[in-house]
Amino acid sequence: MIKHIHPGMPAPDFTTADMHGNPVALKDYQGRKVLLSFFRFSACALCNLRVHQLIGRFPAWQSQGLDVIAVFESPEPNMKQYVGTQDAPFPLVADPMALVYRLYGVETSEEKVQATLADGDTKNVIAQAAAAGFKLTPEEGSNFHRIPAEFIIDEQGIVQIAHYNRLLTDHLELASIDHFATSL
């Protein structure tokens, strides 16, 4: 069983690279707030919709001292082909071996994927993704059963919010992130 991260815990440090080869180390964000978002795979329409939403809010968040790091369980070439086309102003990290996922206890669950598919609101979210230009696309070798998670980390590297999705679609509310970004 993978250990979940809880509020009040130090955020596990990691060093990796974004999809362009630039170094990304959590310790380099000391003194700034961080939204660390774990997604399924780079072709996931629902994940791409969420990245699109984060991109839209990022300028305001960054001016308030909040940075974003987005992690995908996909190889770098897939990242560039799919989510990379959005030209996010924050690091998009390819973690095909799920090393950072394991540090944060981000789960894989066939049951939660099935529950998402059975949920009545899922069709609305898929329609929103399609309207934004993100269609349901399989990604060869992807972990279809990966469940997203998001963590808000304060300036001292302490987890303030640990959100493990119950469904693929129940991300941390954007209003909660907005509130954290504006807090002192």
Image (spheres, rainbow, N blue to C red):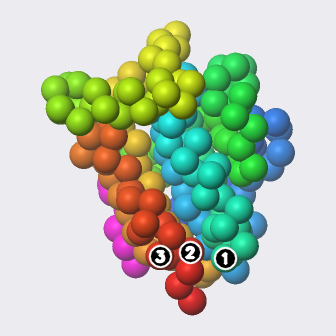
* Contact (Cβ within 8 Å) of mark 3 with mark 2: yes
Q: CA distance from mark 3 to mark 2?
A: 5 Å
Q: Is residue 131 above or below residue 180?
A: above
Mark identifier at residue 181: 2
Residue 61 is covered by the magenta coloring: no
Q: Left or right: where does residue 125 sit relative to residue 21?
A: left
Q: Residue 57 sits in which quadrant?
A: bottom right
Q: Residue at x 40, y 42 (%)?
A: 148
Residue under numbered circle 3: 179
Q: Nearer the viewer, residue 125 or 168?
A: 125
Q: Nearer the viewer, residue 80 or 64?
A: 64
Residue under numbered circle 1: 64
Residue 26 image point, x, y percent: 66, 62
Is residue 66 something one can see in this rendering? yes
Kind of residue indicated by mark 2: Ala
Q: Residue 161 sits in which quadrant?
A: bottom left
Kind of residue indicated by mark 1: Gln
Look at the image and tell me in which quarter the N terminus lies. Answer: top left
Q: Is residue 148 above or below residue 162?
A: above
* Contact (Cβ within 8 Å) of mark 1 with mark 2: yes
Residue 54 image point, x, y percent: 58, 51
Of the two numbered discs 1 and 2 on the same chain, state the one appearing first in sequence. 1
Q: Which residues are magenta?
A: 3-9
Secondary structure predominantly adopted by residues drawn in magenta = loop
Q: Callout 2: 10 Å neighbours few (<14), some, many (20+)? A: many
Q: Secondary structure at mark 2?
A: helix
Q: Is residue 87 above or below residue 142?
A: below
